[in-house]
């Protein structure tokens, strides 16, 4: 569980604030809310996206699969994470289905080569991604 929370931190920080987000300001981790896994693959999201600090990378494939590679920060330090799963977009949310079946939803804002994922719930952790060229 700690590994996944840290992964989402990288995603959100996803998915980086993909994966369970660590706040870029506080370094604290919080779990995004769970949701049903439904939606479609948005062609504007398909491709490789990197966290602004270059420490994490998401690859969103047109078939609805994703891979995450990166270094994730947690209260206990940083560690490398590698994960594959499924992704979809619905109603302004990006949803991730992890290999263990857990579904996490983030609010998302995409504009050109920028993608911002924000954890849902009381602690709003944010991950900013840029499309890799």
Image (tube, helix red, strand yellow):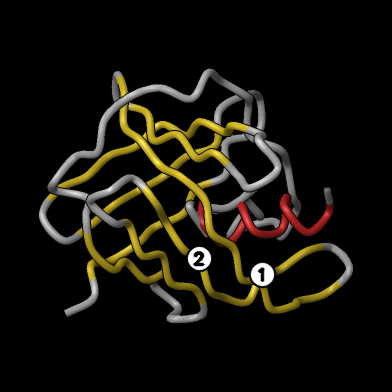
Q: Kindly identify which numbered label has been placed on residue 68.
A: 2
SS type, badge 2: strand
Q: Quadrant of the C terminus?
A: bottom left
Q: Nearer the viewer, residue 117 or 46?
A: 46
Q: Nearer the viewer, residue 104 or 31?
A: 104
| Residue located beneath label 1 in the image | 72
Residue 66 x, y percent position in the rendering: 42, 56
State yes or no: discs 1 and 2 in contact (Cβ < 8 Å): no
Neighbours of disc 2 within 10 Å: few (<14), some (14-19), many (20+) = many
Question: Residue drawn at (41%, 31%), measured in percent from left and top?
Answer: 107
SS type, badge 1: strand
Neighbours of disc 1 within 10 Å: few (<14), some (14-19), many (20+) = many
Q: Kindly identify which numbered label has been placed on residue 100.
A: none
Give how far apart the Cα atoms at labels 1 and 2 are: 11 Å
Vertical arrangement, residue 71 with respect to residue 3, above or below: below
* Residue 9 horizontal side relative to residue 37, left or right: right
Residue 29 x, y percent position in the rendering: 74, 50
Quadrant in the rendering for residue 53: bottom left
Residue 88 x, y percent position in the rendering: 35, 35
* Residue 62 horizontal side relative to residue 87, left or right: left
């Amino acid at each position: 569980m700690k590994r996944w929370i840290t992964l989402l931190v990288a995603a959100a920080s996803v998915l980086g604030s993909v994966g369970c987000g660590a706040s870029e300001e506080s370094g604290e981790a919080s779990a995004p809310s769970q949701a049903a896994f439904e939606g479609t693959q948005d062609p504007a999201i398909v491709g490789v996206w990197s966290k602004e600090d270059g420490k994490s990378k998401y690859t969103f494939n047109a078939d609805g699969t994703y891979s995450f590679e990166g270094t994730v920060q947690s209260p206990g330090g940083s560690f490398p994470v590698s994960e594959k799963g499924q992704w979809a977009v619905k109603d302004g949310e990006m949803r991730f289905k992890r290999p263990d079946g857990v579904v996490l939803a983030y609010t998302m804002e995409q504009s050109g080569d920028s993608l911002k994922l924000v954890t849902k719930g009381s602690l709003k952790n944010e991950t900013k991604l840029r499309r890799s060229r």
